[in-house]
Image (cartoon, helix red, strand yellow):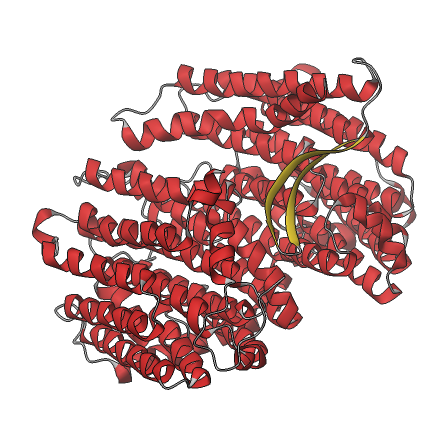
């Protein structure tokens, strides 16, 4: 079987590398980060995903956050500091795991993920990245996926995780709902990207909460699909702002005529991030809702409403940014290197949408294995 | 032969969509957009293939290839993890094959009509891409054997509908109407999604065949599920209080209005009610609610249609009145009548919508229809005047919905304000 040959760390590494390299390929030569940067990040991702020792894996994750902080510093100090705090929290997780304090490790890791995913109210740093350094944001989404992976692998197999699950689910659902409400009153493209990121951050936290009931693979799929969708949106937004500057909703601006491919790619990534059927987001949302229901039916309904609001906000954003009377713009549409990135990310979203088992089954087999470090591990899942 | 059935069922759903990657990849990677001919031929080929497949599936159902085929046709699983699964299961029964064949035939007719009608229109290619999406969504809705698949098709219908409404996006009004319709859809779709999750959790499966066990549930739970399905159907079929988006939807091109709001999409809510009939059957509360909603919508639409001054708007409300009556029929349990009514009504409206652009020409040729006083006008002229005055504003439905949502928007603005202040306080950056 082809699926048997896949292993969760390798697959996750592939998704992370794609997100890591996508902004490098799409960026103009003058804006490209140095080669050592991508190589170092790739190295930390390999360390995070493949090292069997949990303390070392979390240390590798903190190193990647540090490297992202370095890249973000020239554009946004708020974002860089938030990434550094997240790196420190991850170091704390490594220390707690080393000292067999799994409950502390679980909580610290959850907060670190919340900061990296941009869940409210831990979102200040990440929304600064969305505003001022969308490419760094896309890259840090890659290492957020890796962080979630080791959270699920090492610190979620624990009785305390089960006990805290309903609270975390409600917190995540509430955070997603508040961010979705905010998304409905945004008046510019950056505001939309900020709030979309925060909605997905809330959903990732809710998924982490529900993961402890043997829903590890579902949580990973939710994170990967959010990462790919938001990563694509971030790259398209960066591409658009390079052409026309900061975009507000003051009126419908009709940019779809001038940038048809950019508009199509934006629509596709926007649709993926609001769970359009056929994309990974649809399956991820469906799975998320079923896993959330086990912990909190109210939380499930709240997430459904949040998703509905985000969908409406996405259409509002698209209509203001791309629809309307055509505007004469001299800037070119997506250039080949940007198109390649858009097609690669879109293809992955569609492949995972139609065949989610490619990621789910290997991840389920891998993450269900109870790690040996847990003080009071639960028996393996069904 | 079963393999042929599987192939045909799959083709009926997927074939229309084949045009989308063919056009989409060209748009993203090539330097030129496909021309009208290429876009039309790709779409038409997909639609014809789907039609052929639907005919063969109908043949299987009718017993043309041996024993008549009825029931669930398994294609495996979209995903399965622990005790949760999304089955790839399609349903071959009287309702599904009728609606599948009927919808694809109407789509083919509208596609052919549109080729001429939209010739040299700037959005020609976009129209046919959306039509392909729509056709796939319709087939999925018609043939789905489980709620998850049904929901996927339902969402595709909603998105393509919103895109068609905003088709002439150079003007502000179609874009605004598109957002409003999409917002209504998504709000009502939340009901279907919650119902899907609840059905799975309570019945152990979201297959339509599992709904037969709804009678074993406590009354409160079956009523909750039935009401959620009803809510979703009300949104898609523009029943009160969600009727406001329908006249706005007439901003789209006439062929899409005919297909969506005359023939197929407006009846999707009714199809949902027919599909989940086992749940409705055991819930008298939901059925009573459906009868009230359907009757209220029929009366409202019948009043509005008498004061509407544009052809498509009047047709929209005439459609709505009949759809309201079909909702009543379904909720009263007259399933066969409802299905016949649905099919005949869709055919009539499709023709009327497609003729609507020629209405001025027709009125010159055949003369105006004379106004005949209605029963209400004769029996209670004052009441009639008041009713018509209220109908002129469509009972201010949109305003009332806006008012209902305004507290949520106030909260949203407050959260946004607090969030900005907090972020500003925490920020280490200068102004961007």
**Drawn side of residue B112 relative to residue B97, left or right:** left
Vertical side of B144 occupied by A166: above or below: below
Find residue B177 and report its horizontal and vertical position in percent: 52, 47
The picture places residue B122, in percent across and down from the top left corner, at 38, 27
The residue furthest front is: A372
Q: Is residue B248 left or right of residue B418?
A: right
In this rendering, the answer to whether A229 lies above or below B364 is: below
Looking at the rendering, which quadrant does residue A337 occupy?
Answer: top left
A180, above or below B276, in the image: below
Any part of residue B426 in sight: yes
The number of discs equals 0
Residue at 72% x, 44% y: name it. B269
Q: What residue lies at 54% left-to-right and 71% top-to-bottom? A: A212
Q: Nearer the viewer, residue A183 or A249?
A: A183
Q: Residue at horizontal 91%, vertical 57%?
A: B284
Q: Position of residue B212 (x, y in %)?
A: 85, 48
Location of residue B350 in the rendering, given as x and y in whole percent from the top left corner: 68, 26
Decide which of B315, A260 is in the foreground and name it. Answer: A260
Vertical relation: A362 (above or below) A254: below
> Looking at this view, is B30 or B300 the one in front?
B30
At 31% from the left edge and 33% from the top edge, which residue is drawn?
B28
Residue A182 seen in the figure: no
Q: Nearer the viewer, residue A217 or A240?
A: A217
């Amino acid at each position: 079987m082809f699926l048997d040959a896949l292993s969760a760390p390798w697959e996750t590494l592939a998704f992370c590398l794609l997100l890591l390299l996508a902004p490098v390929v799409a960026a103009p030569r003058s804006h490209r980060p140095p080669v050592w940067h991508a190589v170092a990040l790739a190295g930390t991702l390999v360390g995070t995903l493949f090292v069997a020792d949990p303390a070392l894996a979390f240390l590798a994750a903190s190193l990647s956050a540090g490297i992202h902080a370095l890249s973000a510093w020239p554009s946004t100090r708020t974002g860089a500091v938030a990434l550094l705090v997240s790196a420190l929290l991850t170091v704390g997780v490594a220390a707690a795991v080393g000292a067999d304090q799994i409950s502390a490790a679980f909580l610290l890791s959850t907060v670190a993920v919340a900061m990296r995913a941009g869940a409210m109210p831990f979102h200040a740093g990440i929304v600064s990245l969305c505003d001022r350094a969308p490419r760094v944001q896309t890259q840090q989404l890659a290492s957020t996926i890796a962080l979630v992976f080791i959270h699920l692998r090492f610190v979620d197999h624990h009785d305390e995780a089960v006990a805290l699950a309903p609270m975390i689910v409600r917190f995540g659902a509430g955070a997603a709902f508040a961010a979705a409400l905010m998304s409905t009153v945004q008046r510019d493209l950056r505001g939309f990207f900020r709030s979309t990121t925060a909605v997905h951050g809330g959903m990732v936290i809710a998924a982490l909460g529900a993961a402890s009931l043997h829903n590890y693979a579902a949580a990973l799929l939710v994170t990967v699909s959010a990462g790919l969708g938001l990563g694509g949106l971030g790259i398209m937004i960066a591409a658009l702002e390079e052409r026309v500057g900061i975009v507000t909703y003051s009126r419908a601006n009709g940019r779809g005529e001038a940038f048809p491919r950019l508009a199509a790619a934006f629509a596709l990534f926007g649709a993926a991030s609001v769970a359009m059927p056929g994309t990974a987001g649809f399956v991820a949302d469906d799975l998320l809702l079923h896993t959330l229901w086990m912990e909190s039916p109210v939380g499930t309904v709240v997430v459904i409403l949040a998703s509905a609001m985000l969908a409406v906000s996405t259409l509002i954003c698209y209509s203001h940014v791309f629809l309307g009377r055509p505007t004469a713009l001299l800037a070119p549409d997506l250039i080949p290197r940007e198109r390649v990135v858009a097609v690669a990310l879109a293809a992955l979203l569609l492949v995972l949408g139609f065949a989610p088992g490619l990621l789910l089954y290997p991840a389920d087999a891998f993450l269900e294995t109870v790690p040996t470090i847990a003080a009071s591990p639960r028996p393996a899942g069904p | 032969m079963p393999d042929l059935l599987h192939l045909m069922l799959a083709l009926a759903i997927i074939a229309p969509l084949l045009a989308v990657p063919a056009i989409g990849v060209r748009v993203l990677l090539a330097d030129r957009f496909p021309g009208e001919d290429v876009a039309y031929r790709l779409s038409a080929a997909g639609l014809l293939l789907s039609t052929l497949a639907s005919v063969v599936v109908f043949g299987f159902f009718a017993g043309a290839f041996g024993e008549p085929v009825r029931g669930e046709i398994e294609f495996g699983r979209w995903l399965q993890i622990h005790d949760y699964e999304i089955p790839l299961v399609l349903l071959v029964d009287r309702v599904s094959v009728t609606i599948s064949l009927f919808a694809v035939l109407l789509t083919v007719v509208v596609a052919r009509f549109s080729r001429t009608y939209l010739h040299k229109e700037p959005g020609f290619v976009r129209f046919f891409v959306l039509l392909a999406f729509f056709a796939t969504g319709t087939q999925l809705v018609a043939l789905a054997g489980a709620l998850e698949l049904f929901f996927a098709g339902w969402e595709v219908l909603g998105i393509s509908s919103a895109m068609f409404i905003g088709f002439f996006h150079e003007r502000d009004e179609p874009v605004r109407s598109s957002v409003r319709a999409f917002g209504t859809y998504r709000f009502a779709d939340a009901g279907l999604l919650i119902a899907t999750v609840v059905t799975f959790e309570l019945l152990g499966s979201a297959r339509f065949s599992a709904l037969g066990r709804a009678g074993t549930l406590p009354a409160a739970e079956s009523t909750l599920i039935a009401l959620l399905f009803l809510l979703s159907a009300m949104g898609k079929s523009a029943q009160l209080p969600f009727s406001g988006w329908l006249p706005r939807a007439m901003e789209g091109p006439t062929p899409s209005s005919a297909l969506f709001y005359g023939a197929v999409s407006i009846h999707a809510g009714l199809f949902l009610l027919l599909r989940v009939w086992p749940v409705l059957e055991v819930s008298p509360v939901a059925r009573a609610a459906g009868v009230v909603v359907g009757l209220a919508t029929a009366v409202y639409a019948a009043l509005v249609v008498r004061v509407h001054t544009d052809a498509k708007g009047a047709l929209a409300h005439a459609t709505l009145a009949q759809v309201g009556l079909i909702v009543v029929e379904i909720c009263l349990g007259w399933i066969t009548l409802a299905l016949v009514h649905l099919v005949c009504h869709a055919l009539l409206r499709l023709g009327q919508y497609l003729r609507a652009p020629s209405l001025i020409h027709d009125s010159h040729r055949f003369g105006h229809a004379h106004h005949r006083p209605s029963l209400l006008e004769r029996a209670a002229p004052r009441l009639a005047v008041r009713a018509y005055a209220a109908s002129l504003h469509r009972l201010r439905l949109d305003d009332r919905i806006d008012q209902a949502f305004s507290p949520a928007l106030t909260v949203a603005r407050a959260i946004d304000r607090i969030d900005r202040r907090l972020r500003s306080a925490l920020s280490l950056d200068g102004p961007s």
